[in-house]
Image: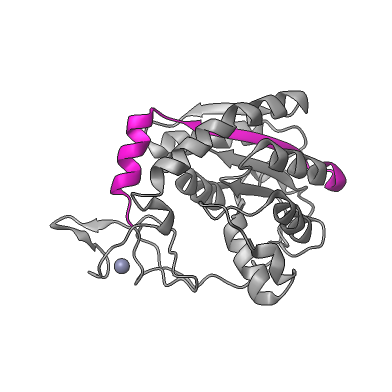
């Protein structure tokens, strides 16, 4: 990470793509497979907007958009009940609380088949195509990445105390930030006592998500993600470009 960190806005600013239709790309994969990196590449290269449910929930809670009770959860991994997910998706994409156009990449969403159904229904209501992109890699590869991954609380001050962007370590001091020399940390969700449960839940729910995508007849692409991350991002970009009816912001012919 070499870019300048920016404070996250309360709600994303609307992006002006002219007449570009909206398309949803549900980007799933095991922890540390590279979803954030791919989402960042798509943001830069095709003007995609990244949607993270947990961030949007936090913004909605602060803004008082939804009843506070909705955010209560007893789930050991902190997941919201599907009813709360439904309310959040509707607020975001039907009631204009996430005012983005063009390609919207939902990072690490859906978490289960019910959530894919919800997103599918919203896509139909909006007339927006939906594609699921599954990043996959060997378990030992992602487990190693998850253990090594660090974030920088100094370079990415986060109001919830949960910085997200992967940080580059000082080559001479692996636990120090290569940019600010501050102490690096794990993401909250990368804690060693949490990671195995996240992997387990992902694997456990994946079959039902795939089955749901088949039943709903939506495009579903599996992309092997052990390779170089630029190559993975490029492969995902090609798949998105193939969505019928979508034209991405970086394609000059889309501006007519
Ligand atoms: Zn730093």
Residue occupying the point 61% across, 42% down = 111
Residue occupying the point 30% across, 39% down = 144
Closer to the camera in the image, 210 or 105 = 210
Residue 247 locus on image (x, y percent): 71, 41
- Image: 41 above or below 57: above
Total of numbered circles in the picture? 0
Residue occupying the point 70% across, 33% down = 243
In what quadrant does ligand 1 lie?
bottom left
As for residue 21 lying within the magenta part, the answer is no
Q: Quadrant of residue 252?
A: top right
- Image: 134 above or below 19: above
Closer to the camera in the image, 173 or 245 = 173
As for residue 134 lying within the magenta part, the answer is yes
Highlighted magenta segment, given as a residue range: 124-150
Residue 168 locus on image (x, y percent): 29, 56
Residue 195 locus on image (x, y percent): 40, 45
Q: Is residue 81 left or right of residue 128?
A: left
Q: Is residue 237 left or right of residue 179?
A: right
Q: Which residue lies furthest to the front in this view?
A: 74
Q: In this view, does 125 lie to the left or right of 246?
A: right
């Amino acid at each position: 990470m070499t870019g300048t960190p920016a404070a996250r806005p309360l709600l994303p600013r609307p992006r002006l793509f002219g007449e570009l239709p909206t398309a949803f790309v549900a980007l799933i994969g095991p922890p540390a497979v590279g979803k954030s990196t791919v989402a960042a590449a798509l943001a830069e290269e095709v003007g995609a907007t990244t949607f993270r449910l947990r961030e949007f929930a936090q913004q909605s809670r602060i803004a008082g958009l939804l009843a506070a009770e909705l955010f209560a959860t007893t789930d050991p991994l902190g997941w919201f009940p599907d009813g709360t997910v439904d309310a959040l998706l509707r607020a975001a994409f039907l009631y204009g609380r996430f005012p983005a156009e063009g390609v919207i990449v939902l990072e690490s969403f859906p978490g289960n088949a019910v959530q894919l159904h919800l997103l599918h229904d919203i896509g139909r209501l909006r007339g927006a195509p939906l594609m699921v992109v599954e990043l996959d890699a060997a378990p030992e590869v992602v487990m190693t990445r998850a253990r090594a991954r660090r974030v920088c609380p100094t370079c990415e001050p986060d109001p919830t105390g949960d910085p997200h962007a992967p940080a580059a370590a000082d080559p001479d001091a692996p636990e120090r930030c290569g940019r600010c020399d501050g102490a690096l940390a794990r993401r909250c969700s990368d804690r060693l006592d949490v990671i195995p449960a996240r992997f387990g839940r992902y694997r456990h729910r994946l079959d039902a998500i795939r089955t749901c995508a088949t039943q709903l007849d939506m495009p579903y692409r599996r992309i092997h993600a052990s390779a170089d991350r630029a190559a993975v991002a490029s492969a995902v970009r090609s798949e998105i470009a193939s969505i019928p009816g979508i034209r991405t912001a970086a394609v000059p012919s889309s501006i007519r």
